[in-house]
Structures are given as C-alpha cells and as structure tokens.
Image (cartoon, helix red, strand yellow):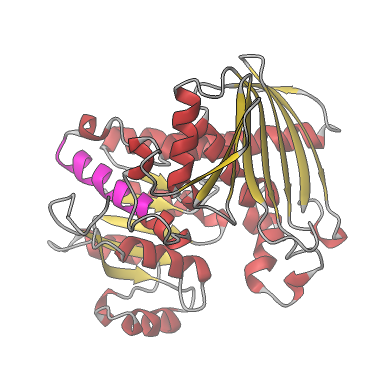
Amino acid sequence: MINGTRLTKSAIRWGMVGGGKGSQIGYVHRSAALRDGYFDLKAGAFDLDPGRGRDFGVELGLDPDRCYRDYGTMFAAESARSDGIRCVTVATPNNTHYPITRAALLAGLHVICEKPLTFTTAEALDLQAIAAERGLVVGVAYGYSGHQMIEEAARLVADGTLGRIRIVTLQFAHGFHSQAVEGDSPATRWRVDPAFAGPSYVLGDLATHPLYIAQVICPDLRIRRLLCTRQSFVASRAPLEDNATVLMEYDTGAVGTCWTSAVNAGAMHSQKVRVVGSRGSVEWWDEHPNQLRLEIQGEPARLLDRGMPYLHPQALADDRIGAGHPEGLFDAWANLHYRFALAIEAHEDGEPSRVSGLRFPGIAAGVEGVRWVEHCVRSADAGGVWVDYG
C-alpha cells in the first residue's frame, strides 16, 4: 500500500508544455504528478499567449524567469541550467505532440505525453528510436489504466480463472457531444478539426483508452486483422468521426469489438472492458472503478471490491487507503506518475532492467495506439473492409 514512503531518491525537476489556465487535462496532470512528491514543477510554457502563460505560471508559484514563451525557448534555457528540468509533460493539441516530444528527447528530457502520441506510426517509431538511443523514458497518458482493479482482471486472466480467452468487448461511448457543442467549446473545437486532431476524433481520443486496458488485461492477444466503420452524425465534423465500430480478430482465434462514440446521448462515460473466457468473464466500468464484476459459469455473479484481501497481491500494491473508501481518477493518474518516476530514475541510473517488470503505458503503448488508429481509419475509408494488422 502506498503510505507516503518515498520509492525514489528525490523529486524529479519537471516542466509542462500546455495545460495552462482553464485546461482540465493540465490540472489533472499537475494533480497526479505532484500528488506523492515524485515530481517538482519548476518550469512551463503553458500558453500560446506568453503573457497569459507567464501569469499562470506565477500563480502556480513558479519563478517568473522560468515561465517561457514557447517550448523551444524552455528546452534551451533549462538545458543550460545546472538545476534544469529533467522531464516534461506535453499537454497540447494532437498536432503538436510529435514536434514537441521530439524536441524534448533531443534536449535530453524524459517525456510524459498526452495521447495519441503522434499522427502517424512512422512518427511514433521515430520517437521510439530516439528515446531508445538516448536512454529516455516516454510515458503516455492512458490514465485510467492506473486503477487497481484492472490489475486484478489481468491476474484472473493470467492464472486461468477465466479459461481460454474467446471474446473482448471494448466501449467508450459518452453523449456529451451529441450536438455541435464545439461552437461554444474551444476544447472540443480542435478535437474535431483534422488540422489539430489528426486522422480521427473518437478513435484516437477515446477508444485508445480501453484498447490499452485490454492489452494490460490480455497481454498475449495480438490483433491479426480488423474492420472499422465510422460516422459523422454531426455532419460538420466530417471527415472526422464522432461514432465508430471496430471488429477485431486475434491470432489465438479470439475476437473483439470496440464501440466508441461522443454521441451516445444521455450516457456519461460508458467506458467498459469485458473479457470472456471459456470458464468465465470479467467486466470493468470506469464509472465504478473500484469494482470488478466476475462471472464464473454455473456460479453466482460477484462484485470484487478494491482493497480486499481476497484480491491478488498485485491488485493491492497501489492502494492508497483501506477498502470501502472510494478511490478515483486522480488516484489512478497518480499511480501511473509514481511509476513514471521510478522508470525515469532507473534509466538515469543506467539500470533500466531495475524496472523491467514495472507496468506503465510507455512508448510501446503509444506506438501501438497510433498504429491501431491508422489501421481503423484505413479500413473505414476503404468502405469498412477487413485489413491485415501488419
């Protein structure tokens, strides 16, 4: 259980690009990174408006001289300081992820990047190569994967409780954009503009979350081919989709489906992952993240609760408080950030093998998310055809 005991030698000097005043995701990143004292915010280029960004940084308690007009200036200035930042979070629109992350890696900085990591697989592989060459960590913000009951689902699959995995169903389908809300919401407006969002909207913005969770729960499943159809029910969003359905076939013979939507009117998040085996099934729902539904054929269905001693030890490792007390999104994101910190310190010590068994969404997860979206778009744009997952 996390009880305030430091697991690294010191806090990591840390900066942010984007995530300025009014940014929900910026607040989430800061809350998670600073939660356990593994990161220490020292610098930022928070806003396209330099004055507004500087004022916000000062509000956060930063030295005004370390509130920069742009990320290039920040990387150059911080690299020249003996107490410069060691890691940077990229919390900006999708079209900037690749150039900012690449510049950060070339400046010798570890990176925590919003998803999707890049527009294309080629760009993502370029970042992966640079990070490997320089011994740097790239974390990707699949924040929901920090919930402990996902680890319990993974252990139930690994120990054979569910039997042979047959079916995986993924869903992230909220209703908050069932109308053209982007007219009044800048945060939504860029997400439905291909110049900023890239080749997809809900596939990249939403579906990659349950996709990564499924990869955590069923790490041995490999997609063999997939078929995708996508729609723009709010017509002004075309060619970007606000609804999509994906069918997947895995190399084991298992099958999968993914429904992702921003127009599921009346729904909240509705992010669910269900894994069906030959003996039983598990289902996790992000609106009730402290519970996992376990159904064994011929037995009563049961709800497993976070923090209880009947869970696998790995599912108890990140508990912050005893069973019965709810933990939520900020706790899950903080769980990932302390793991990012452990990985960063191990790489800086020249001992990456020290964290070889540590689970967190790293560069490989980022590459896979981009590759999956790319294949989905290719299938949908060809008329909804099966495409080999190469």
Magenta span contains residue 343: yes
What residue lies at 75% left-to-right and 64% top-to-bottom? 177
Estimate the x, y position of residue 40 in percent, counting from the top left: 24, 65
Q: Residue at x 33, y 48 (%)?
A: 318
Q: Is residue 188 visible?
A: yes
The mark total stands at 0
Q: Residue, x 14% and y 56% (percent of image)?
A: 10
Instruction: Say if 231 sits above or below 219 in the image.
Output: below
Q: Position of residue 231 (x, y in %)?
A: 83, 48
Q: Is residue 90 left or right of residue 226?
A: left
Judge whether residue 281 is colored magenta. no
Q: Where is residue 190 drawn, in percent x and y?
A: 65, 64
Identify the image quadrant of the C terminus: top right
Report the span colored magenta: 335-350
**Quadrant assignment, res 350:** top left
Residue in front for this viewpoint, 59 or 193: 59
Query: In the figure, 156 relative to 337: above or below?
Result: above
Q: Is residue 263 left or right of residue 364?
A: right
Where does the image place residue 214, in percent across and percent down from the top left? 56, 35
| Relative horizontal placement of residue 387, taking residue 362 as reference (left or right) | right
